[in-house]
Amino acid sequence: MALTLFNTLGRRLEPFQPFNPDKVGFYGCGPTVYNYAHIGNLRAYVTHDLLVKTLKYLGYGVNHVMNVTDVGHLSGDDDSGDDKMVKSAAERGKSVLEIAEFYTRAFFDDLDRMNIARPQVVSKATEHIFDMIELIKRIEKAGFTYEAGGNLYFDISRFPHYGELALLRLDELRAGARTGVDENKRNPQDFVLWFTKSKFENQALSWDSPWGRGYPGWHIECSAMSIKYLGEQFDIHAGGIDHVPIHHTNEIAQSEAATGKHPWVRYWVHNEFLVMDKGKMSKSSGSFLTLQSLIDEGYGALDYRYFLLGGHYRSQLQFSFEALDGARNARRSLLDRVKALSDQAEAIPGAFPAGAEDKSGGEAQKTLDNFRAALEDDLSSPRALAELWSLVRNPRIRAGDALAAAFTMDSVFSLDLRKTALERKEGSGESEESVREIERLVAERAAAKKVKDFSTADRIRDELKEKGIALEDGPGGTVWKRL
Ligand code: AMP
Ligand code: ZN
């Protein structure tokens, strides 16, 4: 079997056939850096990571590009509301640049803690304004735009494929049109390519353009940057399911209008949402969970990664602390199995080499084959995880072979299995128990600080200091390290 992916464009499973297997072009929509990423956002990036690592495991080369939105994203994806960056900066009494830098760093810190590999190219919107203007010029030249009220709009009625990705029907859209959203729009689904000061009098960031001084619409950045780094047609574009009806629909319209090439992107991969008991998690409402808040509660970043891998990316996943407890326990048992296998093995092997002699009568290889088949079946990480479990529990597989196969699987899961085994063998690492105890105390101290019980907080800090642990309080929470 070869890799099949569910393509939102067409809503079906399709065999994956890239333009060039040595250089699969992959663009994943990145964060808007006006606040911390919430744990729902992190589901999107774990999905991208799963996809990239699966492609690499299957032998493809991947060119992964991700944008960082630091201008132009309004609170409504349909051009309504305020600029998220400008609003956040004003609320915090900082410049837009300071806000962008702070939350970009926090974002990559989260990715690192969750073992999410960094993309080859990370491109900031503010550094690609020239590319956006050039692309808008092409769209204008091809006859897809109009100016109204000082803004430049994309005219969706000129683009016959509009809405194909989201299965939108133009006649229905017109019939159900809301009025009063933006008087300048000929069609409610038309969208802004370039804003001038007509929208915001004192926009903090603005650039000169053929349409006046102003700034780009949000959708154009992804089209401009993906085309710049991956070409006018490329293999895979990913993002959360919420991006289907507006953001990605508009990206397609702009890109294909500019280049005249169809389809712009071959495979559209969308992750379903992480949902809370209370419903949707929203970054702009301010009430959401961050990775750091989970860590403050005593969970590891990889517990959350394990939790996410336990659900298929196309199914909604319900978050609860009980479910996260389950993931933490499962990950601990998995690490305990890996430690037990390291104790039994003569030496800690590397990953399972292709064609290695499997002394277990082929059973290690068989679980690897099943693991591969699970991933090839539209990235079924839950089934792939089940194969890892059957591997480490199989008494007929020699410890060294089991470890080697587990490390191979971990090239996709990224749960630090080899690191755990090496630490165990060398006896140089932290024991699980001591780490657990330290994290419990750090969480206890955070809780004390929350209720302004500073004497307890200080007592815990001193207690940890005596054990040789230093605490550092930062904007994202507390980190600890050995002195
Ligand atoms: P943003 O920073 O708001 O542009 O969102 C970053 C990514 O997170 C996008 O791909 C969104 O589609 C995705 N996303 C937002 N909320 C959730 C959620 N609750 N679950 C999964 N993905 C989400
Ligand atoms: Zn995008």
Image (tube, grey):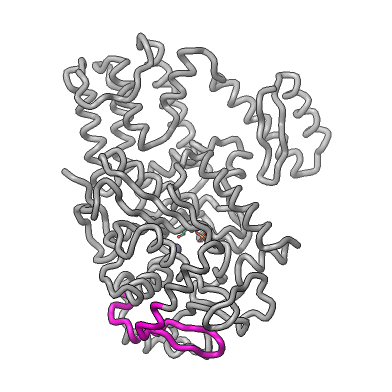
> Relative to residue 151, is residue 334 depicted above or below?
above
Task: Residue 176 in the image: state x and y as whole percent.
Answer: 40, 86
Rendered location of residue 358, percent (x, y): 20, 19
Residue 393 covered by magenta stretch: no
Identify the residue at the far right of this view: 455
Residue 91 position (above or below residue 120): below
136 or 98, which lies in front?
Answer: 136
* Residue 145 within the segment the image draws in magenta: yes
Q: Quadrant of residue 399?
A: top left
405 vs 361, left or right, is right
Q: Residue 359, percent across and down?
A: 20, 15
Which residues fall within the magenta stretch?
138-163
For residue 347, side relative to residue 448 (left or right): left
Q: How many marks?
A: 0
At a point 45% along the width and 73% down the height, the residue shown is 134
Residue at image position (68%, 29%) is 441
Q: In which quarter of the view is residue 226 placed? A: bottom left
Q: Nearer the viewer, residue 295 or 259?
A: 259
Residue sitting at the far top: 346
In the depicted structure, whether residue 120 falls above or below residue 213: above
Task: Give the quarter of the figure containing the C terminus.
Answer: top right
Horizontal arrangement in the rendering, residue 245 relative to residue 470 (left or right): left
Q: Residue at x 60, y 79 (%)?
A: 213
Residue 364, located in which quarter of the rendered image? top left
List x then y, in percent, for residue 268. Answer: 32, 60
Placement of 135 over or under 151, stated as above or below:
above
Looking at this view, is 176 or 347 the one in front?
347
Give the quadrant of the N terminus: top left
